[in-house]
Amino acid sequence: MRRQSVIAGCLTALTLPLAACNEQATVTGGEDFGPSPTLVAPKSSLIPTINIATVNRWSDGAKPTPASGMAVNAFATGLDHPRQLYVLPNGDVLVAESNAPPKPEDGKGIRAWAQRLFQKRAGAVTPSANRITLLRDADGDGTAETRSAFLEGLKSPFGMVLVGDELYVANADAVVKFPYRSGDTRITAAAVKVADLPGGPINHHWTKDITASADGAKLYATVGSNSNVGENGIEAETDRAAVLEIDRVSGAKRVFASGLRNPNSPSWQPQSGALWVTVNERDEIGSDLVPDYMTSVQDGGFYGWPYSYYGQHVDVRVEPQRPDLVAKAIAPDYALGAHTASLGLTFNTGELFPEAMKGGAFVGQHGSWNRNPLSGYKVIFVPFKDGKPAGKPQDVLTGFLNDKDEAQGRPVGVKIDKRGALLVADDVGNVVWRVTPDSAPKAAEAK
C-alpha cells in the first residue's frame, strides 16, 4: 500500500459503510487559491473524509526543499512540538512549545473518535510542554547556539507579543503578562492575568494568538470556534470565532471582528497598516470546501461563520438560519486552498529577500487531515502591492511530505528574524527552520 493514510478515508471495516471512501477533490489546479476561488457544490456524508499523512520524521541531515534561489538550514532542533514564534528586538527568538490542553467535552461521537485516531497517527496528540523557549544566535551564523527555558508552567501557550518592558502571552484560556528586560534568558516572575479568553471544557480550537497595536494601547487576540458549524449551540460560541480587542491596561475586551471560524497569526500589513489573519474554515462538506483563507479584518466586520462561507454562500447545515447575518457577511481577501490548515502568517518587513517580495505574505500551511488528495504541508509566499494580494502563491518550502506521502514535518508559525530571514516552526519535525536567499552573504545578514 502506497501510504497508511489511504486507510484513513475508510477507518475500519466497522465504519466502512459510513465513510466517504471515494470522495476526492475535483478542484486540483490551484483554483481554490486567490481572491475568487472556485466553489463547487457541497458534498455530505455521515463520516467525513479522513486522509492524514502518517508521521515519518526527518532523518539525520534531511530538511525541506527550498524554492529556487533560496536556502534552508535548521535554526534549532530537538524541540517539543514548536508551534508559534516571536522575535524579540535584540534578535532572540521565542518559540512556544505547546499542544492542546485537556478538553473533556470536546469531540464526542464517532466523527471525533475517527479524527483523534488519525491525529495520533500524525503525531498531533502529545502532552503539552507548556513552555516558551528562548533561542539565541549570538554569532550570527544562522543557527541558535544558546537555548534556555524562558517561561515554564504555562497553559498551552501560543501567541506572544512584547509591549515596552512587558511580555504578553496568550494561553489557552487567558492573556497573561510578565516583566521583561532585554537579554533575559529566563523569567521567573509570576504571571499576571490581563484578560480571560474563552476556554472551558470544550475549547475546540485551543490556539489563541495575539498581537498589539502600534501604540501598544490595545491587544488583539484570535479565538477559534467551539465547533465545526455551531453544533454545540450558539451559546457555546460567545466571544469565539473572532478577533477580540483588549485594553492593555484595564483588560476590558470587545469583539473586534467575528464570523472567523479559526483565526490565527494576527499580523499588520506594512503598506496598508491593516490587521490580517489566516482562517481555517469548516469541514465535512467535501475535499473542495471550504478554502482556508487570509483576510484583512475590519472593526465590526462579520465574515460568515457559521451561517455562510466565503461571503454569502449559505451553509444549510446550520440551524436556525440567520439570513440577516448572511447579508452582512464579508468575503475574504484571498483563498489559501481547501483544508490546507494555514496557521502561520507574517509579512516580509525585512531587507534580505528580493525587492519584489517586499511587504508580501509568508504562510505556513500545516496540512490537511480531511482532503483527498492531501493539501498544504508547505510554506508559500503571496506577493502584495499597495497593501493587497497581487499574484499567485509561490512555494517557498516543500518536501514536508516524502515520496510515500508521510509527514516528515508540518509547518506552523512563521516569522521574519532580525536579519530579515524567514523562520518556520515545524511541530512534527520538532525543528525551527531558517530560510534565506541562497545568494545572501553572511556578512550582510549579520548587520
Image (cartoon, grey):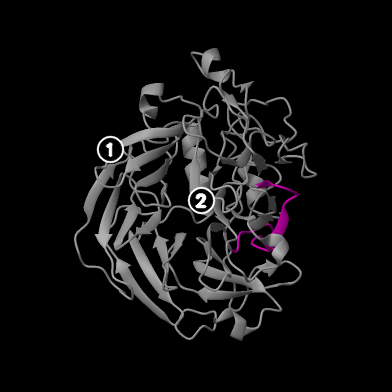
Q: Determine crowd level at label 1: few under 14, some 14-19, many 20+ residues with C-alpha closer than 10 A.
A: few
Q: Which of 247 and 174 is in front in this view?
A: 247
Query: Is residue 2 covered in magenta?
Result: no
Percent x, y of residue 235: 36, 23
Which numbered dot is residue 252? 1
**Which of the 4 quarters of the picture holds residue 122?**
bottom right
Mark 1–mark 2 CB contact (< 8 Å): no
Q: Mark 2 points at which residue?
A: 267
Q: How far apart are marks 1 and 2 (CA)?
A: 21 Å
Residue located at (37% from left, 32% from top): 239
SS class, disc 2: strand
Q: Which of 436 and 54 is in front in this view?
A: 436
Percent x, y of residue 263: 50, 41
Q: Which residue lies furthest to the right in this view?
A: 29
Count of marks, rendered view: 2
Residue type (three-letter) at the residue carrying disc 2: Ser
Residue located at (73% from left, 37% from top): 24
Q: Is residue 296 left or right of residue 102?
A: right
Percent x, y of residue 204: 41, 38
**Which of the 4 quarters of the picture holds residue 278?**
top right
Query: Is residue 390 covered in magenta?
Result: yes
**Residue 403 seen anywhere in this rendered image of the structure:** no
Residue type (three-letter) at the residue carrying disc 1: Ala
**Residue 137 seen anywhere in this rendered image of the structure:** yes
The N terminus - image quarter: bottom right
Residue located at (67% from left, 79% from top): 440
SS class, disc 1: loop
Q: In this view, does 40 lie above or below 274?
A: above
- Magenta stretch in the rendered image: 388-408
